[in-house]
Each structure stands twice: as C-alpha cells, then as structure tokens.
Amino acid sequence: MMETPTKKVFKFVESLVTLGRVLTTSHFKSGFLKVNHNEKIHILGNGPSLQEVDLNILDGDLMAVNNFALTEKFEISKPKYYILNAPEYWIADVDSEYIELRQKLTKAIDSKTLWPMSIYLPFGAKNSDFCEGLQKIKNIEVLFYNTTPVEGYSWLTFRIFDAKLGMPRPHNILIPAIMTSLWMGYKKIFIYGADHSWLSEIFVGENNNVYLTQKHFYDTQTAKPDVMKKLGKNQRRLHEVLEKFYLTFKGYHEIRSYAISRNCQIINYTRNSFIDAFDKK
C-alpha cells in the first residue's frame, strides 16, 4: 500500500524525533545484555489464562514480569529472568499503594529467590532506592535496558533496535520482555498469560472517572474496577487509556516485523488473547 505524502512527512518527522531522543536519552554502553544461545525462552505474562498453564512442562528459560514474585508460581517455576518497566516501582512521588507494593515485591524476591536470577530494569531506575534494594539481594544480578521510544522508518528503527538503544513505546511490560529476549539472542519466544482483554472491562462512571478491571491469574475473582493512574498519581482520562492500548498493540506489530527480519519466531500460547500480531497456538 502506497503511503500518502502526509504519511511520508509524518514518518520523516518521527525518524528525526527518534534520533534526537536516542542521542539525548539512550545509554550507549549496552554490553550488559548477555547473548544466550539457548534457543527458547518462555515469557510469563500475569493474565488470567496463566492459571491454566503447567509451568513444569515448559522446556527452556523462563522470564517473569511485574508482581509474579508475590505468587506461589514464582518458586515453582524459578524463572531465569525477571523484568520490570513501570516507573511506579521506583519513582519517589507516587501514592502510598505503590510504595507498599514495591516493598512487598522486594521482600518477596529477597526471601524466595534461592537460585540465580537476572532482573532487568530501565536505565531510569538505576539510581533509585528500589534498584539499590534489589542489588543487595543474594542470587540477584540487576541489568539495565533502554526504554527510549523508537518510531519512524523501519530501516532506521531496526538498526536502533539492533544497537539496543530503544524499543517501541513500552506501554506494556510484554514489549520490553520480548525486546530483551531478542537482544539476548533467543530465536524462539513463547508467550503465555498475555490475555490483554481489557476493552470489555472499561467503563465511565457517573463521576466521569474511567474505570478498568485489570485481572491477573492471582486475583481473577477479587479484582475490582479502579482508575488507571499515570506515573502513580493522576487518573488517566478515557482517551489516554485508549491511547495507551493503541500504542501497545501497535508496538507488537512493529516487534513482529523486526523479529521476522532477524529470523526469530514469536508464538502466543495465550488462549483467547487479544494480541493480533503474533502467531497463535
């Protein structure tokens, strides 16, 4: 499909902005990411469908995300990698619920992790108290990655991806989880628990607040509607919530194209997943 002149101009501007972002915000010393020659990696999302997955039969390395360490599946699966992305885990000016959550998560990782595990954090978390707390835990290696938003011409964005200087906008933890897996050299990436079925859970209350029930495998029966906050404080309006979802699903298609260009395979094993970018089984 031929691009219109307007789209061509937009793509050109996106590329220039991306170059500016990379030059001013990305960290160029990215040797911390270790190439792994094991062909398979299994990424465990926290969606409701993960409850149906027998983690004992997964053959290959495992990567866990977000609050997975607070569940009993963490000790059962013993993931090799753990990744976090949301700034609410480490920035200072957030509501008390996020402070309590990060404390619980650090304590859980400290007490439960009896095997070697690498935790990936954005460079933005590097000098935070949260990061320092994780670095003190035995068996834990903390590594860092660039979250710089990358957009524009594919010939440019793919080269930036190769250099590990940025990624599609990481509005969902699955985006950095897949990108770091590709950067480590995995050729087959299998995804579980990535339901992404939020659209049916959104509604606007009488007070004009936007509510969303975010269900996970560990709280399917107890999850309640709540506002979606931005950087741990202010409520998102409906257009902001939908924009976040749009950028997430768009990002998966960008990752698919990049993976194909690098002869890597991404397969989504999540039952009834809303993600339409990756092959399903």
Image (spheres, rainbow, N blue to C red):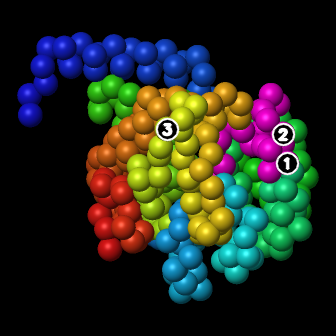
The amino acid beneath tag 1 is Glu
Which of the image's four quarters has the N terminus? Answer: top left
Q: Does dot 3 land on a helix, a strand or a loop?
A: strand
Name the residue beneath numbered marker 3. Answer: 204
Report whether 102 appears left or right of 216: right
Is residue 85 rendered to the left or right of residue 130?
left
Which kind of residue does numbered mark 3 sit on?
Answer: Val
Task: Write down the quadrant of residue 4 in the picture.
Answer: top left
Of 89 and 136, nearer the camera is 89
- Classify the position of the C terminus by image quarter: bottom left
Residue that protrudes farthest toward the front in the picture: 206
Q: Amino acid at mark 2?
A: Ser
In the picture shown, does residue 217 fall above or below 104?
below
Marks 1 and 3 in Cβ contact (< 8 Å):
no
Tag 2, which secondary structure?
A: helix
Name the residue located 80 percent from the left edge and 44 percent from the top edge: 97
In this rendering, is residue 228 above or below 156? below
The residue furthest left is 2
Task: Measure the alpha-carbon separation of dots 1 and 3.
Answer: 28 Å
Residue ID for mark 1: 100
- Relative depth, front residue between 233 and 259: 233
- Graded by Cα atoms within 10 Å as few (under 14), some (14 to 19) or many (20 or more), the crowding at tag 2 reads few
What residue would you read off at disc 2?
Answer: 96
From the viewer's perspective, tell me whether residue 107 is left or right of residue 144.
right
Task: Say which label, 1 or 3, has the lower sequence index.
Answer: 1
Check if residue 129 falls in the magenta segment.
Answer: no
> In the image, is residue 90 part of the stretch drawn in magenta?
yes
Q: Which residues are magenta?
A: 82-101
Asked if disc 2 and disc 1 are in contact, CB closer than 8 Å, the reply is yes
Q: Residue at x 68, y 76 (%)?
A: 73
